[in-house]
Image (cartoon, rainbow, N blue to C red):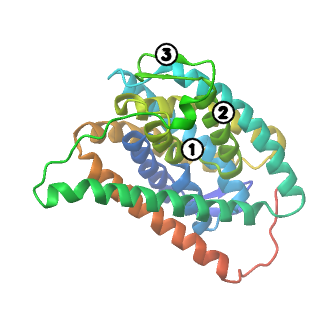
Amino acid sequence: MDVYLPIANLSVNGLFIVMLGFGTGILSGIFGVGGGFLTTPLLIFYGIPPTVAAASAATQVTGASVSGVFGHMRNKGVDFQIGAVMVAGGLCGALVGAGLFSLLQAIGQIDVVINLLYVLLLGTIGWLMMREALAELKPARFGTKKRAAKRRHHPMIAALPYRMRFYASGIYVSPLAPGLLGLIVGILTMLMGVGGGFMMVPAMLYILGMSARVVVGTSLFNILFITMLVTMVHSFTTHAVDIVLAGLLLVGSVTGAQYGTRIAQVAKPEILRLILASIVLAIALRMAFGLTIRPDEVYSVVPL
């Protein structure tokens, strides 16, 4: 079933795109990630221009996040208070990212920057996740009892002024900390088409010290609003959103996210993190390899 994409200016297998959205939707529900960090690279591997892939993936992430948020709300797994602070920072970051995107697009370097960002971020975060997952699995393998780590926020976070209590997350920190985190994620969402959950979830756990019970749902809540703005900004400024591509991805991701939330409630977290880390590292290595080979076409056509 071939479908023509007007902005990307090529025909694709529609069923493949739907299944890609379904797979990333499952990851969204399990890990609290929007799935864009997988969708965008896979679309690029499939032949979609990086600019169109990043802009359209942000739209798909919105659909997956809506479905995932409702699933976690039923289990009271969303901290709306800290989520609102992150959203405010993320909206500012999306506007900053829009300026950077337009600048890089004007000088013809946006495709290279998108690929480099993926290699650096996915490689770093994938390695850290892999190391942590293996460390947590080691005690169980040798029959030793694993000591529960005391959850606390980073010392730099404790030094920030204007601290307040976020009851659902069980932390007492300055709202500047989640606001800055949202700002960074907003910029990355605009540039890379990601929801930012693959960076936000570890940061909320190990930097802010939030309760693991609300991390996934709160991450999806933040991603939902940021990707909505990013989609609007892309539509009016870069004109890189392919509505047909985004629609196919949405069909699969909304359904997949519901299955993901069910899996997250019963699966072993260490095994899930190990699987995700393996996927992230594999994509980072593939993108790094792609930067070393000469493309068939040395010029990139940027949609006007």
- Is 106 placed above or below 241 here? below
Residue 12 at x, y percent in the picture: 59, 62
Question: Label 2 vs label 1: CA separation?
Answer: 10 Å
According to the picture, the residue beneath numbered tag 2 turns out to be: 90
The mark nearer the N terminus, 2 or 1, is 2
Q: Is residue 157 visible?
A: yes
Q: Closer to the observer: label 1 or label 3?
A: 3
According to the picture, the residue beneath numbered tag 1 turns out to be: 196
The mark nearer the N terminus, 3 or 2, is 2
Residue 261 at x, y percent in the picture: 34, 36
For label 3, count other residues whose C-alpha is less than 10 Å away and answer few (under 14), some (14-19) or many (20+): some
- Is 94 placed above or below 70 here? below
Q: Which mark is residue 165?
A: 3
Task: Say which of 27 and 31 sits in front.
Answer: 31
As helix, strand or loop, the secondary structure at mark 3 comes to: strand
The mark nearer the N terminus, 1 or 3, is 3
Amino acid carrying label 2: it is Gly
Drawn side of residue 263 relative to residue 278, left or right: left
As helix, strand or loop, the secondary structure at mark 2 comes to: helix
Amino acid carrying label 3: it is Arg
Which residue is found at the position 50% from the left and 66% from the top? 283
Drawn side of residue 250 relative to residue 187, left or right: left
Amino acid carrying label 1: it is Gly
Task: Say which of 252 and 158 sits in front.
Answer: 158
